[in-house]
Amino acid sequence: MKKESAKDYNDFWEPNTREKELIKLTWSNDFDSLFVLGSSIYIYIFEHNPKTKKLFPGIHQHGENWQESKEFRKQALNVVQTLSFAVKNIYHMDEVADYLYKIGERHVRFADRGFNSEYWNIFQDAMEVSLKQQIASLPNITEVQQQDAIHVWRRLSLYLISHLKRGYFERLRSSKDTLL
């Protein structure tokens, strides 16, 4: 198993001006658009690893109607709130890193429900697929801009996951150390 490190390549990404412009160009603060993106991310996760739904008892309890539950809507909006924070602070990546680190730390409390480090990878995949779909649906951007935007969003999602993991693994290690 690969040991997670704070020196991960993705920890130090600083988008250049063109990358920042592409992120801003392809992001929408429209509520419906954000909800569709957040829903798409969680639908991907739950469909590709159904066990993850058990991490969300409020969603899981709705059985086949989980997508209509207020708990699902809330979770879908939570994830886009994190993405929105990253977009709003794209010129202050150190603040984004700190914000993500803290979210990662909070995920340690879900270990008792079955959360494991593999889920970061499925979350990464879900973000990439969902963002690619969203970018492909945007009017008024060229094919080249779409491809460039997909690339830069992939970099941003790798950055996000890297800092979430760092917070998670460092808190997990410190929790285990205090038990010893």
Image (cartoon, rainbow, N blue to C red):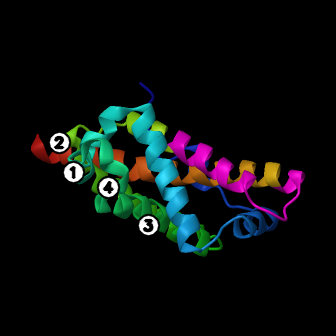
Q: Which residue is mark 3?
A: 99
Q: Quadrant of residue 48?
A: top left
Q: Quadrant of residue 78?
A: bottom left
Q: Main secondary structure of the magenta part?
A: helix
Q: Which residue is mark 4?
A: 105
Q: Which residue is mark 2?
A: 112
* Rendered location of residue 10, percent (x, y): 59, 48
Quick one: 170 or 110, which is closer to the camera? 110
Q: Which disc is residue 10 wearing? A: none
* Rendered location of residue 89, percent (x, y): 58, 74
Can residue 59 be seen here? The reply is yes
Quick one: 32 or 135, which is closer to the camera? 32
Span highlighted in magenta in the image: 124-145
Is 25 covered by the magenta stretch? Answer: no
Q: How many neighbours does mark 3 have within 10 angstroms: few (below 14), some (14-19), or many (20 or more)?
A: some
- Going from the N terminus, do you reach mark 2 or mark 3 first? 3
* Picture residue at 67% right of the left edge, 48% below the top: 132
* Picture residue at 53% right of the left edge, 59% below the top: 36
Above or below: residue 119 compared with residue 148: above
Q: Which residue is mark 1?
A: 109
* Rendered location of residue 168, percent (x, y): 34, 49
